[in-house]
Amino acid sequence: MDERSALRRLAAAVPAAGDDAAVVDGLVVTTDMLHEATDFPAGTTRYTAGWRAVGASLSDIAAMGADATAAVAAYAAPTLEEADLDAFVAGAVDVCEGVGAEYVGGDLDTASEFAAATTAVGETDAPVRRRGATPGETVCVTGALGRTAAGLRAFDAGDVDRGNDLFQFRPRIDAGLALAPHATAMMDSSDGLARSLHQLAEASEVGFEVDPAAVPVHDAVDDYADSDSDRWEMAATVGEDFELVCTLPTRGVAAARDSLNSALTEIGEATDGGITVDGEPLADEGYTHG
Amino acid sequence: MDERSALRRLAAAVPAAGDDAAVVDGLVVTTDMLHEATDFPAGTTRYTAGWRAVGASLSDIAAMGADATAAVAAYAAPTLEEADLDAFVAGAVDVCEGVGAEYVGGDLDTASEFAAATTAVGETDAPVRRRGATPGETVCVTGALGRTAAGLRAFDAGDVDRGNDLFQFRPRIDAGLALAPHATAMMDSSDGLARSLHQLAEASEVGFEVDPAAVPVHDAVDDYADSDSDRWEMAATVGEDFELVCTLPTRGVAAARDSLNSALTEIGEATDGGITVDGEPLADEGYTHG
């Protein structure tokens, strides 16, 4: 099985799974496992890795419209070096502090490859699920897309400082909480905009028509994109950006935007079926976690 | 750094860490990472691995005297086989159901070696810490020790059915909840009785005098132990038994025992200093998680 098939199987076997995070009696729980070969390009510091691994789980809490309470991490590496471990913990603590959550430690293990398994816990009385969008609603995205794609290009180009900076994203807990009273469906863009739209569409049984010119693209993308199509790929399919993608009743968009500290951009609308960009089908392509 | 030193460093860096689980606003969170080479002997089924990995985290919730709410697991293996994954999830679901917690899914990853990172979440208004024991109190243990040592011998002898059965322990959530109003200090015996006593002693700034004849030994140990000293080693230092070790005011032991569904055995008393068995020093030896 590839990982997508396996995750579908897991979701089918465990009723509470299948959304960005599970909800049990108002408690929101999510776990993620990342490893060096696929998630941390050469040049990624352990500080960035701690930030990003814990941030990925916090982003799943944000995607449920929940507040983040705490996070833990299990850290595995071939050897347990003091400086590496201290840096990892510092990154984990800092990303938590930025969203008002507490990093409460974790476990250690030896492994042939550096890996981190992180869990975040949050709270909400009214989680926002992936299902719930209806045709005619507006689809919006927070922040700007392509930050991680630009970070990958920076690492490839040997500009590790910029790569690390771009990889330290701020989880959208505040935005998720502000959107929760308005959004009808929501998830994070960790698999890329294209795949996220397909997942929201499948869960909500709707389609989407997206205006590509409206999609907000991170400034750093323009430093690396070598064509318009490359720019689009970086923003829409590379993924791991951890922005929120949500649907809102059209008349609620202004109120939602007013309640956010970060940008909220309308990129299209929910339809009866099919996922299209400028009327052309949008392929279900994006980041496949490996 | 070895893992013990690294865990100490982690505990020093993260104030909420350092006990069996962290507590934030009544929420109890703990994470563990296990991998094939050190935690799952040849013959361990994926069902047993799912049970045991999630059970280890539930045991940490029990050790705080907390109720278990939910658990998640990140599953990593060289390939994601349907049957393996289904079996792992079934074991995880079953161990949770046995203690009234909900298994709410997890994440998947590829790795050169099978590994599982599990997180359990619980709730308590009055956590029982490792610190809190005072000289003169009685030290008790739930259930019987040496179950895992016997399981390891069973696997070594090729009796994989018995090994798997012995490895599927029941986390002591009920006992932890029943002990919580009485216990002054508590932890689980995952590192073995000897090391657990050293950890409780260090946290509480006390000593312990243990009566070796009083230590409850699991029936299966007698099928494998080849001498009295081997029997003692299996019960006291192999570890990974996930029983609870606690201190109680002597006059509270009877009431605590009456409130438990499982056995509670007095094995000695807290002293001013030194950890002794029949008056001889007990070495700080036990299971070192690798």
Image (cartoon, coloured by chain):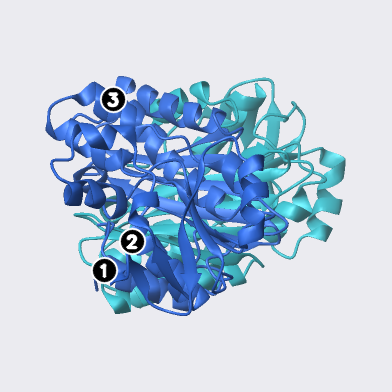
Chain colours: A blue, B cyan
Mark 2 Cα within 10 Å, few/some/many (few <14, many 20+)?
many
Q: Which mark is residue A81?
A: 3
Residue A156 placement (x, y as % from top left) = 13, 34
Q: Amino acid at mark 2?
A: Ala
Q: Amino acid at mark 1?
A: Ala
Residue visible at 23% across and 54% down in the picture: B111
Residue B73 placement (x, y as % from top left) = 45, 58
Q: Earlier in the sequence, mark 2 or mark 3?
A: 3
Which numbered disc, 2 or 3, marks the residue closer to the eye? 2
Q: Are marks 2 and 1 in contact (CB under 8 Å)?
A: yes
Residue on which the image places disc 1? A283
Q: Earlier in the sequence, mark 1 or mark 3?
A: 3
Task: Give the secondary structure at mark 3.
Answer: loop
Whether A9 is drawn above or below B4: the answer is: below
Discs 1 and 3 carry the same chain letter: yes
Where residue B74 sits, quadrant-wise, is bottom left
Of residue A239 and residue B109, the one placed in the foreground of this image is: A239
Task: Give the secondary structure at mark 2.
Answer: helix
Residue A221 placement (x, y as % from top left) = 26, 37
For the question of whether residue A206 can be seen, the reply is yes
Whether A138 is drawn above or below B45: the answer is: above
Q: Which mark is residue A194?
A: 2
Quadrant of the snapshot with the C terminus of chain A: bottom left
Query: Left of B67 or right of it: where is A238?
Result: left
Read off the chain for label 3: A
Q: CA distance from mark 2 to mark 3?
A: 39 Å
Q: CA distance from mark 1 to mark 3?
A: 43 Å
Q: CA distance from mark 2 to mark 1?
A: 7 Å
Which numbered disc, 1 or 3, marks the residue closer to the eye? 1
Q: Which mark is residue A224?
A: none
Query: Left of B278 or right of it: where is B151?
Result: left
Residue visible at 65% across and 21% down in the picture: B205
